[in-house]
Image (cartoon, helix red, strand yellow):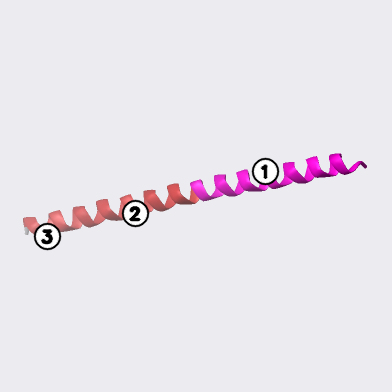
Amino acid sequence: MEASTFKMFEGLLIIGAVVAFAIWQFGSLRRDREERDRRRAEEQKTSDNQKQD
């Protein structure tokens, strides 16, 4: 195997790892945002119910 071929495979592996990590992080951020929004909506609902009492 030539050195240039090895470098190309290494570069593709690094790029693939970076893309996979970015996809994983963006998914994690989306789940965190959805959880935060759900909690805020629940807290808002609870505070609205307490104000009515």
Q: Amino acid at mark 2?
A: Arg
Residue located beneath label 1 in the image? 15
Q: Secondary structure at mark 3?
A: helix
Farthest residue in the front direction? 4
Percent from the top left, x then y, of residue 7?
Answer: 81, 44
Front residue of this view, candidates 42 and 5? 5
Q: Is residue 8 left or right of residue 47?
A: right
State the separation of the CA atoms marked 3 and 2: 21 Å
Q: Amino acid at mark 1?
A: Ile
Front residue of this view, candidates 53 and 26? 26
Tag 2: Cα neighbours inside 10 Å, few (<14), some, or many (≥20)?
few
Q: Secondary structure at mark 2?
A: helix
Percent from the top left, x then y, of residue 42?
Answer: 26, 54
At 25% from the left and 51% from the top, the residue drawn is: 41
Residue 38 within the segment the image draws in magenta: no
Residue located beneath label 3 in the image? 50
Which region of the structure is painted magenta?
Answer: 1-26
Q: Which is in the foreground here, disc 2 or disc 1?
A: 1
Can you tell which mark lies on residue 36? 2
At 68% from the left and 43% from the top, the residue drawn is: 16
Of marks 3 and 1, which one's residue comes earlier in the chain? 1
At 6% from the left and 59% from the top, the residue drawn is: 53
Of marks 3 and 2, which one's residue comes earlier in the chain? 2
- Answer whether labels 3 and 1 touch (C-beta < 8 Å): no
At 41% from the left and 53% from the top, the residue drawn is: 32
Percent from the top left, x then y, of residue 11?
Answer: 74, 43
Q: Magenta residues: mostly which secondary structure?
A: helix
